[in-house]
């Protein structure tokens, strides 16, 4: 994955942010491999969105959620199968009903073990956080939109189709106009392209652009990205524009038969120059790799972008 030395990926219950009535986020404080975690309440039930990496982080989240719920029934969902988002779900067994879209359940079953092994190589703090982790098994799966009634509030769990992963979904709270995007959007860092050929090539830059375009069209008031500060529709626009930029710069060079390695170097330098404040530029090269694989062939008169 990345040569970056990952710090201890600890979920801390600090600076919990209220986004709307009975909707809060435990912010990731820009710590890598810590996701933003949502807690959404209704009159009789509470939904937790994402778990943090490994059992101890999930225990922290579960303790917070139980106290927050104060007797209300607990549900858990995860935005996608990646370890820092989902690999704490087993801790919720018996305490919460774990719901995910079918494609994500398949990702967990097919790729969970491989990702666990890969993440254990990311340094001692990450390996320690993963001690005792089992691959999550959902209690219930669905296709299409799942409307979850929390009591006086319906939350929508909507699979987007393949983008950042095969099984991405967004979670929206329509009455509060809040959207949890998982890693379909990040703030303050380059978009995460989990392009790890030959093991995982599910990420699609092209599909991702289409998905984010659709989400931009919904103009949510509050957008909670997978990682980084909470924003609004502008955050989604920024992600879309970056992905389009990345595609166009990659394909322009591919059209000119520039070798992939050179494309990666050039495009990374260009993107760092255009977004000097963004973290984790190593994801640019992975994005270039993905988009080179999705290159539609030499530009001709019929092709439009
Ligand atoms: Zn992810």
Image (cartoon, grey):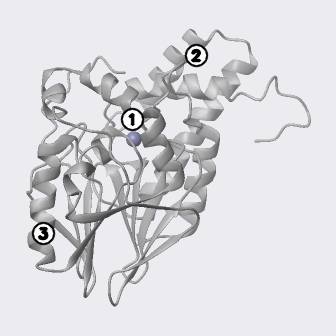
Residue 230 in which image quadrant: bottom left
What's the distance in space between the residues labelled 3 and 2, CA to CA? 49 Å
Determine crowd level at label 1: few under 14, some 14-19, many 20+ residues with C-alpha closer than 10 A: many
Residue sitting farthest toward the right: 301
Position of 66 compared to 235: left or right? left
Select label 3 or label 2 by which is in front: 3
Q: Position of residue 38 (x, y in %)?
A: 27, 63
Disc 3 target residue: 66
Q: Is residue 270 visible?
A: no
Disc 1 target residue: 112
Q: How many numbered markers are drawn?
A: 3
- Please report the residue visible at 58 percent of the width from the left and 27 percent of the height from the top: 290
- Please report the residue visible at 32 percent of the width from the left and 47 percent of the height from the top: 86
Q: Position of residue 64 (x, y in %)?
A: 10, 63
Determine crowd level at label 2: few under 14, some 14-19, many 20+ residues with C-alpha closer than 10 A: many
- Please report the residue visible at 8 percent of the width from the left and 57 percent of the height from the top: 14
In-front residue for pair 267/73: 73
Among the two numbered marks 2 and 1 on one chain, the one whose residue lies closer to the N terminus = 1
In-front residue for pair 236/163: 163
Q: Position of residue 60 (x, y in %)?
A: 10, 53
- Quadrant housing the C terminus: top right
Marks 2 & 1, CB-CB < 8 Å contact: no
For disc 1, does the CB lie below 8 Å from ligand 1?
no
Disc 2 target residue: 263
């Amino acid at each position: 994955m990345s040569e970056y030395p990952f710090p201890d990926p600890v979920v801390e219950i600090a600076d919990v942010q209220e986004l709307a009535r009975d909707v809060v986020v435990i912010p990731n404080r820009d710590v890598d491999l810590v996701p933003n975690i949502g807690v959404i309440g209704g009159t009789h039930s509470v939904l937790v969105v994402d778990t943090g990496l490994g059992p101890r982080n999930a225990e922290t989240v579960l303790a917070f959620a139980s106290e927050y719920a104060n007797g209300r029934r607990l549900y858990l969902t995860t935005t996608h199968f990646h370890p820092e988002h989902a690999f704490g779900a087993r801790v919720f067994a018996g305490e919460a009903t774990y719901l995910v879209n079918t494609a994500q359940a398949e990702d967990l079953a097919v790729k969970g073990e491989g990702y666990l092994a890969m993440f254990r190589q990311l340094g001692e703090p990450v390996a320690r956080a993963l001690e005792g982790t089992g691959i999550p098994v959902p209690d219930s799966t669905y296709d299409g939109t799942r409307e979850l009634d929390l009591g006086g509030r319906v939350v929508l769990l909507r699979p987007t189709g393949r983008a950042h992963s095969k099984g991405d979904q967004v979670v929206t709270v329509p009455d509060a106009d809040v959207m949890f995007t998982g890693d379909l959007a990040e703030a303050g860092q380059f978009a995460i392209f989990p392009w790890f050929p030959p093991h995982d090539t599910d990420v699609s830059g092209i599909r991702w652009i289409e998905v984010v375009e659709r989400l931009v069209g919904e103009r949510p008031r509050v957008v909670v990205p997978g990682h980084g500060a909470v924003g609004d529709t502008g955050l989604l626009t920024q992600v879309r524009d970056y992905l389009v930029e990345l595609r166009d710069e990659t394909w322009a060079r591919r059209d000119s038969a520039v070798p992939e390695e050179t494309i990666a170097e050039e495009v990374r330098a260009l993107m760092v120059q255009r977004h000097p404040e963004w973290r984790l530029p190593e994801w640019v090269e992975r994005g270039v790799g993905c988009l080179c694989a999705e290159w539609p062939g030499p530009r001709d008169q019929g092709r439009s972008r």
